[in-house]
Image: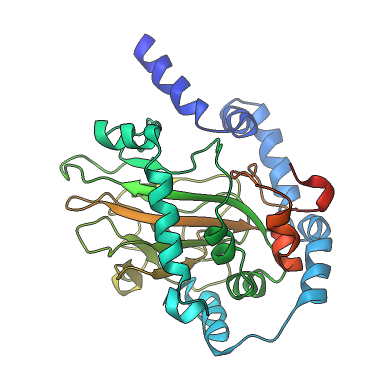
């Protein structure tokens, strides 16, 4: 019993207080009924539209024509829920990817990160094989290359066009997956699931090294995002989520809808995590990726990154400042 309480307390500490409270209330009757009613109302079409009114107005005010690659990205996201490209096709600065790799190395060279890698034990008890460069309670601010990549107009314009509003950046991190034994059963996000933070979202993975089949590549089931052909299969109802083992979805969705996202260094995977997806664990070589998560203003869960000096953000585009909820007076 003591071990059970210790384990669950450690897990709870990896989440924000609102997330923990919400998870508890969903499991306590009759409060669970009231909580579900609250979120049904919040994510209803009318209330959701009201909450995102400013985001839609900002989107219309700052909207620009998309280029060919951006148009293809938005079309694929709307059709299948996922678009895969390469950093060379999405950014004009040819040195940016090298700078991102250098920034990743700097983050991973921190003593605490090196200790976790050496001891093969992440601070996060559930996904113990994923060491996080920023972490759930980040103390390091966003490096310049990360800002340029994940708050650049080309990526934000794709995200905003898909969502139909100016997005908010909710989460950004660097993941280092060290190789582990493949014999253990899948846990948590290794099982098929839909993310719970919003009605529609965008999540971006940037591979900093080549990701092969035995390196736990991200896997997505196409056309399961909201509004798509298979959206009705165990449908998305934020903020609730469930995880499903192999064999549950297979009879309901054709096997050819499953997309395994291997790729060379610099591969970018843009997807709506409201569609079914799962991660994996590498059994051969370390996997290093940057990840960013964008929602609407109505999305839940707190911001998980730290801003640096005001000068780093004042020169950003209006849509980037909106994504950061940034104003000169809000700077640290």
Is residue 9 shown above or below 325?
A: above
Residue closer to the observer: 224 or 300? 300
Left or right: 250 as drawn, with respect to 69: left
Quadrant containing the C terminus is top right
Residue closer to the observer: 199 or 237? 199
Left or right: 293 as drawn, with respect to 94: right
Residue 282 is situated, as x and y percent measured from the top left of the image, at 24, 51
Residue at x 55%, y 41% (from the top left corner): 140
Name of the residue lying farthest toward the top: 2
How many numbered marks, from 0 up? Answer: 0
Residue closer to the observer: 82 or 148? 148
Residue at x 64%, y 73% (from the top left corner): 153
Left or right: 87 as drawn, with respect to 280: right
Residue 190 is situated, as x and y percent measured from the top left of the image, at 34, 48
Name of the residue lying farthest toward the bottom: 68
Quadrant containing the N terminus is top left
Residue closer to the observer: 109 or 270? 109
Residue 305 shows up from this direction:
yes
Residue 297 shows up from this direction:
no
Residue 23 is situated, as x and y percent measured from the top left of the image, at 57, 32
Q: Quadrant of residue 318?
A: bottom right
Is residue 267 shown above or below 65?
A: above
Residue at x 66%, y 26% (from the top left corner): 30
Residue 175 is situated, as x and y percent measured from the top left of the image, at 39, 49
């Amino acid at each position: 019993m003591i071990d059970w309480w210790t384990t669950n307390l450690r897990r709870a500490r990896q989440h924000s207080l609102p997330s923990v409270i919400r998870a508890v209330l969903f499991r306590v009757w009759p409060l669970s009924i009231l909580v579900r009613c609250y979120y049904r109302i919040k994510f209803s079409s009318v209330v959701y539209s009201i909450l995102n009114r400013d985001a839609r107005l900002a989107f219309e005010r700052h909207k620009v024509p998309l280029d060919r690659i951006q148009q293809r990205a938005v079309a694929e996201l709307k059709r299948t829920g996922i678009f895969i490209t390469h950093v060379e096709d999405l950014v004009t600065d040819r040195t940016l990817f090298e700078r991102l790799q250098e920034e990743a190395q700097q983050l991973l060279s921190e003593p605490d990160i090196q200790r976790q890698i050496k001891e093969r034990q992440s601070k996060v008890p559930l996904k113990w094989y994923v060491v996080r460069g920023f972490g759930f309670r980040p103390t390091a601010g966003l490096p310049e290359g990360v800002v340029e990549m994940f708050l650049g107009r080309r990526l934000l314009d794709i995200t905003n066009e898909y969502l139909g509003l100016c997005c908010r950046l909710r989460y950004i991190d660097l993941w280092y997956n060290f190789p582990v034994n493949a014999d253990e059963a899948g846990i948590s996000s290794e099982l098929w699931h839909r993310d719970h933070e919003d009605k529609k979202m965008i999540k971006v993975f940037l591979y900093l090294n080549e990701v092969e089949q035995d390196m736990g590549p991200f896997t997505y089931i196409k056309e399961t995002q909201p509004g798509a052909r298979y959206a009705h299969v165990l449908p998305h109802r934020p903020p609730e989520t469930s995880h499903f083992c192999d064999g549950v979805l297979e009879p309901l969705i054709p096997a050819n809808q499953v997309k395994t996202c291997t790729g060379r260094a610099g591969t970018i995977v843009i997807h709506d995590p409201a569609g079914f997806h799962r991660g994996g664990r590498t059994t051969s070589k370390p996997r290093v990726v940057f990840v960013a998560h964008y929602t609407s203003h109505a999305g839940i869960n707190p911001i998980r990154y730290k801003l640096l000096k005001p000068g780093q953000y004042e020169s950003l585009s209006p849509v980037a400042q909106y994504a950061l909820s940034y104003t000169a007076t809000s700077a640290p």
